[in-house]
Image: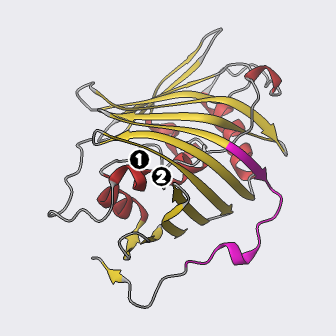
């Protein structure tokens, strides 16, 4: 998977700030030992069934998270508030030093993004918009799954499973795609994702994410901390608070854009 070039020379806002948009996860402090254990998993189908039941149980989510990152050699901190409602409504508000940086609203595969500092607006396929404004590619993880701290696996990937290993200390699944290979490592007692690595067809590591400090909340286990590394870029997330399946009102899923906004193609 090649790193995508940024189009032209337009730099519409600092890229580290935009990366806050990508990676909000869930969680409050807890360890793996507090999560319910699953029956011994001996096949990929059993693991996929467990993962699917968890994601199907997530109806809505509200998260506040702090983020520390280094992107394009620039370090920055920020705070993000996220609202999610199944199946596809996702709203993100981001502030840096108490100043609004961006607002984003995603529905289905479309993403509308407003950059408050520059008064710029973009809209289009989620992955295209994110790739354009950040230079980071979350396609292997699934952009929505990366944002919510979920796992991008379903029964449809069974024909692409290149390997499955059940060890005493880990479950490892290898997914072979045309542009990359994913290698996912799960905790065998609780079946939560601990690490996911993405390799090029030539075997070069091109991206890695780790998830830790899981907590069970309203029956759903999600991580409190996550790190994603792509080349020299790194993003760390520490969730401050989270509400799961508590009901998110319709008013949260609105994107306010000024009349004089500058629309970018």
Q: Quick check: is 253 in the magenta stretch? A: yes
Q: Say which of 89 and 165 sits in front.
A: 89
Q: Say which of 108 and 234 sits in front.
A: 234
For mark 2, give the secondary structure: loop
The stretch in magenta equals: 240-255
Q: Position of residue 66 (x, y in %)?
A: 58, 44
Which marked residue is nearer to the observer: mark 2 or mark 1? 2
Q: Quadrant of the C terminus?
A: bottom left
Q: Quick check: is 23 in the magenta stretch? A: no
Alpha carbon separation for disc pair 2 and 1: 8 Å
Q: Say which of 131 and 233 sits in front.
A: 233
Q: Earlier in the sequence, mark 2 or mark 1?
A: 2
Above or below: residue 212 compared with residue 102: above
Q: Position of residue 155 (x, y in %)?
A: 58, 43
Q: So how many labels did they put on this image?
A: 2
Which residue is tagged 2?
22
Query: In the rendered image, is residue 107 in sight?
Result: no
Which mark, by number, is residue 138?
A: 1
Q: Residue at x 61, y 34 (%)?
A: 225
Q: Residue furthest bottom?
A: 259
Judge from the rendering whether residue 104 lies leftward or rightward of residue 41; answer left or right. Answer: left
Query: In the rendered image, is residue 79 in sight?
Result: yes
Q: How is the image coloured?
A: secondary structure
């Amino acid at each position: 998977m090649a790193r995508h070039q940024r189009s032209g020379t337009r730099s519409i806002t600092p890229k580290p700030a935009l990366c806050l948009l990508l990676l909000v996860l869930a969680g409050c402090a807890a360890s793996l030992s507090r999560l319910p254990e699953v029956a011994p998993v001996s096949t990929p189908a059993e693991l996929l069934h467990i993962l699917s039941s968890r994601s199907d149980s997530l109806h809505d989510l509200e998260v506040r998270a702090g983020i520390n990152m280094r992107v394009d050699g620039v370090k920055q901190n920020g705070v993000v508030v996220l609202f999610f409602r199944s199946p596809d409504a996702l709203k993100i508000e981001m502030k840096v030093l108490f100043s609004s940086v961006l607002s984003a609203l995603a529905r289905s595969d479309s993403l509308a993004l407003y950059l408050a500092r520059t008064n710029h607006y973009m809209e289009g396929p989620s992955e295209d918009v994110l790739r354009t404004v950040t230079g980071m590619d979350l396609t292997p993880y699934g952009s929505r799954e990366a944002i919510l701290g979920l796992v991008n696996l379903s029964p449809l990937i069974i024909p692409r499973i290149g390997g499955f290993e059940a060890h005493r200390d880990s479950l490892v699944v290898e997914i072979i795609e045309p542009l990359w290979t994913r290698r996912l490592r799960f905790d065998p007692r609780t079946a939560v994702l601990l690490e996911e690595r993405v390799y090029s067809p030539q075997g070069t590591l091109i991206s890695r994410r780790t998830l830790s400090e899981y907590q069970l909340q309203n029956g759903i286990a999600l991580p409190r901390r996550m790190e994603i590394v792509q080349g020299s870029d790194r993003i760390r997330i520490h969730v401050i608070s989270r509400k799961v399946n508590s009901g998110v009102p319709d008013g949260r899923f609105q994107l306010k854009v000024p009349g004089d906004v500058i629309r970018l193609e």
